[in-house]
Image (cartoon, rainbow, N blue to C red):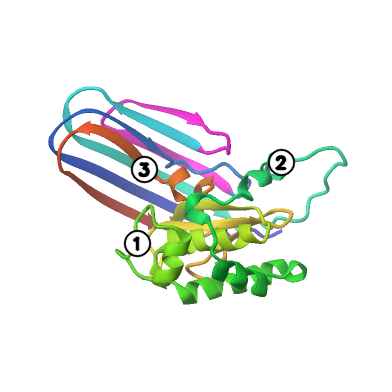
Amino acid sequence: MNKKIRRMRVKHETTYTYEHDIRYAIQRFYLTPRANKKVQVLNWEVRANFELSSQTDFFGNTMHLLVVNKPCRKISISVFGLIDISSHIDKSSKRGKSKFSFDEVSTILFKRPTHLTLANEEIQSVARRVYNKKTQQQSLLELAEVIEKRIVYSKGVTGVRTTAVDAWQRGAGVCQDHAHVMLAACRSQGLSARYVSGYLHGGTSASEATHAWVEVWIGKWLGIDVTHKKVVDNNFLSLAVGKDYLSVSPVRGVRNGGGEERMSVNVAVTG
């Protein structure tokens, strides 16, 4: 099989500056590629101005923790990476009668909606009308088109705690809102669907290098980018999967002290 390779260079810098000294802070972040057959990590470094620890969570994501335990007015996190991603074609695997993969076992965990991914009657009605078990991939793409048409890509209209219903009713949002509504629609039909956080190479004006999409279980995980109404290909690099944005947000934390916070983010994803 001829595999096309996408080489991806990532530079992602996040800096927090504070008006006063922080007394204590803890940051949790998911900024390391998920291991799979398509991804070859040639180099990947995560750096910070405080000591980092890492662990693998239940879903196979690499999670870093940063703890600030002395006064400071700045936290900086930097990622530098070089990745090769193949356009691997996932053929139907021959499964044993009594053996199941972790993905198959974990699918039940992604059937239940969260606060951010509850569907109202209108979202449920659209999902029932569009989704067809006989043409799963095609109907899921059609569902993505309906959602993208309803929710116009617009920055600054929604926030990290905006629910799927809120975004649907506003008719505007960003990629995470597209993903949340897609999750709500899929889960309302009994499908297992999970939120994916990652990077997108060659993003258009309707997205940035940091991106979000969904994966729906149809006997394998099918990645669908609602914002661009397409099946995920080797332009996408997955960092973490979870139930919604808040469960696997790239960087999230709490702090004590510091006063006003300013955050600057610089992301570049190139070939």
Residue farthest along the left direction in this orientation: 19
For the residue marked with disc 3, what is the amino acid? Answer: Val
* Numbered badge on residue 105: 2
Residue 53 is one of the magenta-drawn residues: yes
Locate the C terminus and report the quarter of the image it occupies. bottom left
Query: Helix, strand or loop at disc 2?
Result: helix
Q: Quadrant of residue 137?
A: bottom right
- Position of residue 219 measured from the top left corner of the image (x, y, whole percent): 74, 54
Q: Which mark is residue 158?
A: 1
Crowding around mark 1 (Cα neighbors within 10 Å: few <14, some 14 to 19, many 20+) is: some
- In the rendered view, would you say 186 is above or below 196? below
Q: Write the residue at 70% across / 53% down.
A: 220
CB contact under 8 Å: marks 2 and 1: no
Residue range of the region highlighted in magenta in the rendering: 39-61
Q: Sequence-wise, which precedes: disc 2 or disc 1?
A: 2
Sequence-first tag of 3 and 1: 1
Distance, label 2 to label 1, CA atoms, is 34 Å
Q: Residue 251 has which mark?
A: 3
Percent from the top left, x then y, of residue 52?
A: 36, 28
Q: Quadrant of residue 204?
A: bottom left
- Front tag of 2 and 1: 1
- The answer to whether residue 222 shows anywhere in this view is no
